Amino acid sequence: MKTLVTGATGFLGSHVARALLARGEDVRVLVRPSSDLRALEGLAAERVQGDLRDRASLDRAMHDVRRVYHVAADYRLWARDPREIHESNVTGTRNLLDSARSAGVEKFIYTSTVATVAVPREGTLPNEETQSSVGEMIGEYKRSKFEAEQVALQAAEAGQPVVIVNPTTPVGPGDWKPTPTGKIIVDFLNGRMPGYVDTGLNFVPVEDCAHGHLLAAEKGRVGQRYILGGRNLTLKQMLDMLAAASGRLAPRWKFPHVLAYAAGFVDSGVSRLLGREPQIPLDGVRMARHKMFVDSSKAERELGFAPGPVEAAIERAAAWYEANGYVVAGRTPAVAGARAA
């Protein structure tokens, strides 16, 4: 049985590909001509060039495939042209589902995001039963992932064997890009973090999150969502863990959200003038006003998902960034939390 993985050149997707190969599966990965292939080094996976926006290339990649893990996503909190994010995440997901249906794929695992679930609600923590709306999604990335998840759910309702996973915030080694959360860790390690904002996320070891995808393929119910999460932590708690793992001091100053927003507003203006990506994306600041805590017990009950300690994953992440040349000195300070998703 051949298995197709999209997004294998990225952080989570590369770990999904590794987990599949480790259990002996015949893995094919979809890569773009412009992809950074460092995450695939040492992996005995077949590589096929294609693009989620090019249906013909997807049909070629789908030849002889029986299972698909669609992990690819355009994960940015800022883009010069937000339509690029929508095209990759929404149109790309629709194209891949159509191609999989035509090829008779037996199981399709769609990687959504906890953002479609972790919306402000009174009372209990949000879970897979929480109903949200596109209007509650902040920024083009979250809006596009919400719309793409709806496309996947509609495909399941129409009879396709689609199971959806909603990862929280993966941490660990191998984040080459790095992701927005990875940038927080890199800023911390480089001493570029004078303070933080009062926010929170659910963190999960990336290796365990990848394994959760495999569990969803084996045990997940078609048309269901499964949050792949670990521990709910405030940003301050996460930074304290990072300080303990790296031997560096944690930032002491808690900045009010209004100050972070003002900094982001100024940075965005300067970035437009200079034609560069803002260091403090305004969408990131807006997201940080809400702690994205969730209840991930459904995956534990139905899939047997059992993530390991987040502290160890943070330590692995810090060591990996150090070993791969991300720790340098002398850059502009940033406000922790403005990049979290």
Image (cartoon, rainbow, N blue to C red):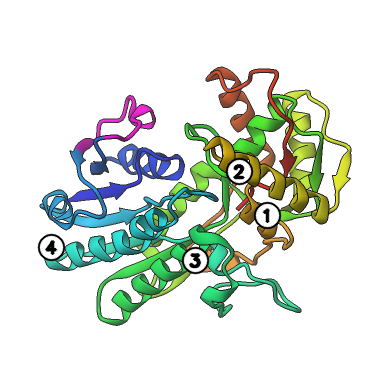
Indicate yes or no whether the magenta region holds residue 39: yes
> Disc 2 vs disc 1: which is toward the camera?
2
Residue positioned 63% across, 21% down in the render: 327
State if disc 2 and disc 3 touch (CB < 8 Å): no
- Distance of mark 4 from mark 3, alpha carbons? 29 Å
Q: Which residue is mark 4?
A: 103
Mark 3 residue type: Arg
Amino acid at circle 2: Thr
Disc nearer the start of the sequence (4/1)? 4
Mark 4 and mark 2 lie on one chain; the one further toward the N terminus is: 4
Name the spot of residue 218 as percent of width and height, x first. 35, 61
Q: Secondary structure at mark 4?
A: helix
Tell me the residue that label 2 is attached to. 181
- The magenta segment is 34-47
- The one of 127 and 339 positioned closer to us in this rendering: 339
- Please tell me which of labels 4 and 3 falls first in the chain: 4
Is residue 17 something one can see in this rendering? yes
Disc 1: which residue: 201
The residue at which mark 3 appears reads as 143
Q: Which amino acid type is marked by label 4?
A: Ala
